[in-house]
Amino acid sequence: MEESKSLESSAPKRRSRADRQAKPAEPNSENKTLYVGGLKPGISSQQVYDYFADHKFSVVKGKIRVSSKDYSNVFGIVNFCSHAEAQKALDSLNNTDLDGCNIRIMWFNQNLMSKEREQANIYVKDLHSSITQKDLSDKFSEFGTILSVKLETFANKESRGYGYVQFDEREQAVKAIQEMDGTLWNGKTITV
């Protein structure tokens, strides 16, 4: 269980041609790795590892990465002993608090922002200040499988009034837009 206690750069690493052409891991495959977003700058790999281990999950490794484009974008990559264990962690710890930050957890996927995936990503604005990231996830989950939800917040954790929902398929995003755009939610008309 070797764990680095410092932030590690996520500078792009040279990958082989086979790696670049490999299909991304899908949630229904035997993926054992989760992405943990919304972490506080300065958090260590050991803290992320301990968070999941303290919740009784069989963690193999936890690493911290920092986006090369936005140094405040700190995220973790956590490997579990099995797909089932990772699924349980995703189901029980998504949108929970880790070291003062509301974390978002999703399946780790190198190609999440491919052109195909980008078309399944929607923007939701004019949200009431009481809407939480979990509320956003719950509200839009009726339209399909959600890969990621992010509610943008200020430093004091208050909502900025907008967020993003990424679906598994473009058709799910289209349906959400058609059914939710212009609807009333907590007294405000939202734009999707």
Image (cartoon, rainbow, N blue to C red):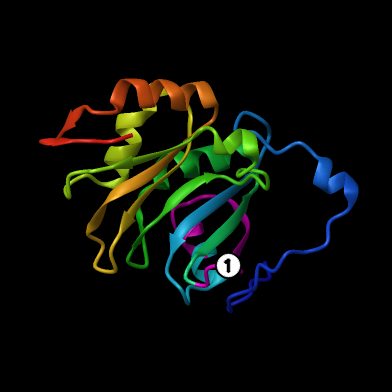
The secondary element bearing badge 1 is classed as loop
Using the rendered image of the protein, determine whether residue 144 is visible from the camera's viewpoint. Answer: no
- Residue that protrudes farthest toward the left in the picture: 187
The C terminus appears in which quarter of the rendering? top left
Tell me where residue 24 sits by quadrant: top right
Q: Which residue is mark 1?
A: 69
Residue 34 on image: x %, y %: 57, 48
Horizontally, residue 14 falls left or right of residue 139, namely: right
Residue 61 on image: x %, y %: 64, 59
- Residue that protrudes farthest toward the right in the picture: 17
Q: Who's the residue at 29% across and 69% down the image?
A: 155
The N terminus appears in which quarter of the rendering? bottom right
Packing grade of label 1 (10 A; few <14, some 14-19, many >=20) is few
Position of residue 65 relative to residue 103, above or below, is: below
Count of numbered circles on the image: 1
Residue 53 on image: x %, y %: 51, 57
Q: Who's the residue at 48% across and 44% down the image?
A: 89
In the image shown, does 28 or 152 lie closer to the viewer?
Answer: 152
Q: Who's the residue at 16% across and 47% down the image?
A: 130
64 within the magenta span: yes
Residue 50 on image: x %, y %: 50, 64
- Mark 1 residue type: Lys
Position of residue 15 relative to residue 165, above or below, is: below
Q: Who's the residue at 52% across and 68% down the image?
A: 70
Magenta segment, which residues? 50-71
Horizontally, residue 102 falls left or right of residue 112, namely: left
In the image shown, does 154 or 26 lie closer to the viewer?
Answer: 154
116 within the magenta span: no
Using the rendered image of the protein, determine whether residue 22 is visible from the camera's viewpoint. Answer: yes
Tell me where residue 118 sits by quadrant: top right
Horizontally, residue 129 falls left or right of residue 41, namely: left
